[in-house]
Image (tube, grey):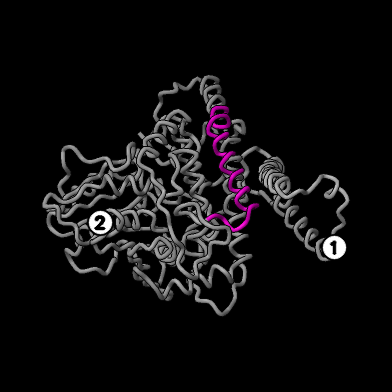
């Protein structure tokens, strides 16, 4: 996993990885990948919609108008941060398109790597 | 009857879930918790549960919960219909008891059946990935919290970072990245990820309602003496702390092979001002003295253990339980090696693709008979600590 700050006590050991990423359930690995993307996209879309609901509720209580939002110009720092978040979003939602998916769902059962 | 697939998987009916949900909510009271100094609760806490660190993460988990609820109603029904069509087409009596291999030969090339499995797993992957990404992105904060908690109580923590962890314990059960041993935040990830499992199928558990319910119904020795309790395979310690709350004067231990799990369990117990003790130990090598405990129990651990491991654990339970003490390993009904095709299908994909590596072995043995053969008596009317699960109420002879 990701490198952790070195000044902390750590306890993790090596895990035996699941091969679920390579499972082909729908007869075509590309189709499997698309389904994974759809669910991830749904997750991100709902998170966005839910945040909007919170924001609208909070803003309304503090006098922020729709016009103020439309005219807002982000700072360079904000632009950079938002681009980084965009890339994370795309990696989560579109990244599964790149899964190799070479193993038929029923192949070699019950053998695993 | 509640089997493993119905609990962590997607085949439970909404009606059944609603009934059980009501049962648990009737006794679910959220305790007010004052967070000790140094506790990380970035967005505060809802009773016993610290809110997730960001609104987005909370919303992502909210989606995966919603998806599970929809899946239980629609996707699983769609897959079941496809199953029925296939059996009809192939002229197979739906009541035919099949082995896993026989079932698989029948359905292997039917995507209409597999769509429910695929979508459930994809949703599961999103659940884990979003949680794992968050905790690793904020590793310094959460590791600092655990560093501080390691050294304080009220309960004790024993970690064994150099212990040799058997391969059988290192699988990524439920496809949780890193499993129970391989990620510093395995406990955090498991705790928040399983909340949606519970809500979607068994009922709310964010305030440990289900664990508290099991602890409340756990049978005690006939002489009423409960001074020491052992929770084997305690995971994130929800059952352990519930036991400590029921028996506040008792010495309560939770043990688990997953170091990150017991570390999180101890951190959380501190947050709850709960004096349960936690140790990173094997359930078949607990290192406690003979006859030390009045109650030895576990919460859905055995289906994560090889059959031979289960037998060794029962032997160890017998060793550390005092005469007249109660051994109560809560787990799913064990289902044998044959079932009707849809039930066997659920068991198969859960085993193979949800990475329940040892579930086949669990189903292959008669768990209750194994206990009875090892120096325990089984009451004629065992107490059901969790309705629908196996009631294995054993008394040390």
Q: Mark 1 Cα within 10 Å, few/some/many (few <14, many 20+)?
A: few
Q: Nearer the viewer, residue B140 or B292?
A: B140
Residue B336: in sight, yes or no? no
Element assignment for label 2: loop
Q: Mark 2 Cα within 10 Å, few/some/many (few <14, many 20+)?
A: some
Q: Which label was assigned to residue B82? A: none
| Residue at position x 25%, y 64% in the image | B251
Q: Does the magenta segment cover residue B59?
A: yes
**Chain of the residue where label 2 is placed in the rendered structure:** B
Q: Quadrant of the N terminus of chain B?
A: top left
Residue B196: in sight, yes or no? yes
Q: Is residue A48 left or right of residue B268?
A: right
**Chain of the residue where label 1 is placed in the rendered structure:** A
Residue B338's place in the image compared with B161, above or below, is above
| Residue at position x 33%, y 62% in the image | B254
| Residue at position x 36%, y 72% in the image | B158
Identify the residue position indicated by label 2 in the image. Answer: B247
Q: Which residues are magenta?
A: B51-78
Tally of numbered discs: 2
| Residue at position x 57%, y 61% in the image | B42
Residue B244 sits in quarter: bottom left
Q: Does the magenta segment cover residue B370?
A: no
Identify the residue position indicated by label 1 in the image. Answer: A75
Q: Is residue B220 left or right of residue B210?
A: left
């Amino acid at each position: 996993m990701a490198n952790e700050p070195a000044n902390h006590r750590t306890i993790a050991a090596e895990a035996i990885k699941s091969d679920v990423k390579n499972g082909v359930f729908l007869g075509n690995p590309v189709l499997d990948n698309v389904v994974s993307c759809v669910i991830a996209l749904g997750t991100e879309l709902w998170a966005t919609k839910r945040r909007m609901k919170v924001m609208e509720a909070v803003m309304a209580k503090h006098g922020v108008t729709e016009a103020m939002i439309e005219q807002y110009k982000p700072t360079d720092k904000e632009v950079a941060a938002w681009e980084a978040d965009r890339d994370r979003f795309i990696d989560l939602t579109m990244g599964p398109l790149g899964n190799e998916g070479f193993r038929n769902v029923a192949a070699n059962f019950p053998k695993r790597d | 009857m509640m089997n493993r697939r119905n609990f962590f998987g997607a085949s439970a009916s909404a009606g059944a879930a609603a009934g059980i949900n009501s049962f648990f909510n009737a006794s679910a009271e959220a305790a007010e918790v004052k967070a000790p100094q140094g506790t990380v609760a970035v967005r505060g806490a809802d009773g016993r549960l610290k809110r997730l660190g960001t609104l987005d993460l909370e919303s992502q988990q909210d989606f995966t919960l919603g998806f599970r609820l929809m899946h239980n109603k629609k996707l699983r029904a769609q897959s079941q219909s496809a199953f029925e069509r296939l059996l009809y087409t192939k002229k197979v009596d739906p009541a035919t008891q099949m082995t896993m291999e026989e079932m698989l030969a029948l359905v292997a090339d039917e995507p209409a059946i597999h769509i429910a499995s695929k979508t459930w797993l994809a949703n599961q992957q999103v659940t884990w990935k979003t949680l794992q990404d968050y905790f690793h992105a904020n590793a310094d904060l959460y590791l600092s919290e655990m560093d501080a908690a390691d050294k304080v109580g009220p309960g004790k923590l024993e970690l064994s970072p150099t212990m040799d962890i058997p391969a059988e314990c290192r699988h990524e059960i439920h496809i949780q990245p890193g499993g129970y041993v391989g990620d510093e935040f395995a406990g955090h990830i498991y705790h928040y990820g399983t909340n949606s499992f519970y809500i979607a199928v068994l009922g709310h558990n964010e305030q440990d309602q289900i664990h508290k319910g099991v602890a409340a119904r756990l049978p005690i020795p006939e002489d009423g003496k409960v001074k020491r309790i052992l929770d084997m395979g305690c995971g994130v310690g929800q059952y352990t702390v519930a036991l400590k709350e029921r028996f506040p004067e008792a010495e309560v231990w939770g043990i688990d092979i997953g170091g990150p799990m017991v570390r999180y369990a101890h951190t959380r117990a501190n947050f709850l001002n709960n004096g349960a003790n936690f140790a990173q130990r094997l359930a078949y090598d607990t290192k406690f003295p003979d006859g030390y405990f009045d109650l030895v129990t576990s919460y859905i651990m055995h289906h994560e253990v090889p059959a031979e491991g289960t037998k060794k654990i029962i032997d160890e339970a017998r060793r550390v339980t005092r005469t007249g003490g109660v051994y109560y390993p809560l787990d799913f009904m064990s289902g044998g090696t044959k079932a009707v095709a849809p039930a066997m299908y659920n068991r198969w994909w859960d085993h193979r693709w949800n990475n329940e590596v040892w579930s086949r072995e669990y189903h292959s043995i008669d768990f209750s008979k194994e206990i009875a053969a090892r120096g325990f008596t089984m009451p004629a009317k065992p107490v059901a600590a969790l309705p629908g699960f196996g009631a294995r109420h054993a008394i040390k002879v």
